[in-house]
Image (cartoon, grey):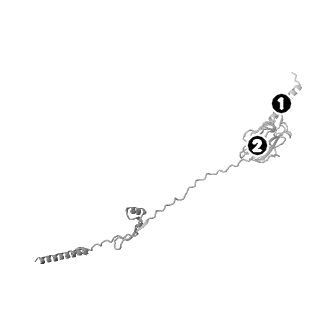
Amino acid sequence: MVVRRGHCSHAGTVIFRLLLTGFLASAALVVGAPTATAAACESTGVTVVVDFGSLGGGVQTRCAPGDPNSGLAALAQAGFGYTFPTRQPGFVCRIDNRPGPDIDACVNTPPATAYWSYWHADRGGSWNYSSFGAANRDPASGTVEGWSYGAGKAPGVAPPAKPAPIPPVVPPQPVPVSTTAPPVVPPRPTTPVPTTVAPGSSALSSSVALPTTELSATASASPVPTSSVPESITPPLSQPEPTAAQKESGGGPTTLIVVGVVVVVLAGVAAVTARRRARDE
């Protein structure tokens, strides 16, 4: 069997080229893991804006949660895939497979008229062209990263505005409880009615205070009107009782008077009787 050297060398060259092409193709793709699809970040995280320009897809805004340590990490954590050129890794030539191989083979650095420019900004601020590569810049949490395809122009939309401040939580106010005591109603005044007791009586002089309601009841039961009630009421004098000596002697002054009257009457009757007898004789 005769082996021709020309055919062997040609076959080896073809196999080598195929292997090299597969290796370069595999090295050219560096795809970020899509982990977020939200719009601008609410408070923390890095907001990523990608303007695809004439490549189709418009402008997309997503959030890279947490604190990415580089622009490439923010791009990947926001859910965008990226590709390096085979001869110059570290330079982004594709984002989400744009531009396609028909526009850029991603072998060499893209021309200045059609490449992915890298920008950064504060929330609500303006775009600034980054002087550092995406692999060497550490974006701060709360800032914005921008990518735009074309001749080095900024993204076609302004950086997202600052998030609205979170209003403070105001605890509910307790309902005030009144500690004031209710007003005390004073008792109704009474009208004092003094009562005077004559001297010599066993009762002591005193002033009796009758409530108003009792005075009203007394006034309604008595023919005397309320306005004519005397301020001083003097009870009749009581008859003194006879002493023990008077009781033993047969009575007091009243008994003597009665005896005297009887004696006078009897004397008169005797005189009349004597006169009648004198006439008869």
Q: Amino acid at mark 1?
A: Leu
Percent of width and height locating residue 182: 52, 59
The answer to which image quadrant residue 244 occupies is bottom left
- Is residue 98 shown to the viewer in this render? no
Residue on which disc 1 sits: 18
Quadrant location, the N terminus? top right
Disc 2 target residue:
48
Q: Nearer the viewer, residue 138 or 191?
A: 191
Pinpoint residue 252: horizontal percent, then vertical percent.
25, 74
Answer with the quarter of the image where residue 53 lies: top right
In the image, residue 38 sits, relative to residue 192, either above or below, namely: above
Q: Can you tell which mark lies on residue 277?
A: none
Of 40 and 237, nearer the camera is 237
Q: Identify the secondary structure beneath mark 2.
A: strand
Task: Give the vertical position of 138 relative to 180 (above or below).
Answer: above
* Along the viewing direction, whichever of 236 and 76 lies nearer the viewer: 236
Q: Is 245 left or right of 182, judged from the image as shown?
A: left
> Which amino acid type is shown beneath numbered disc 2?
Val
Earlier residue among tags 1 and 2: 1
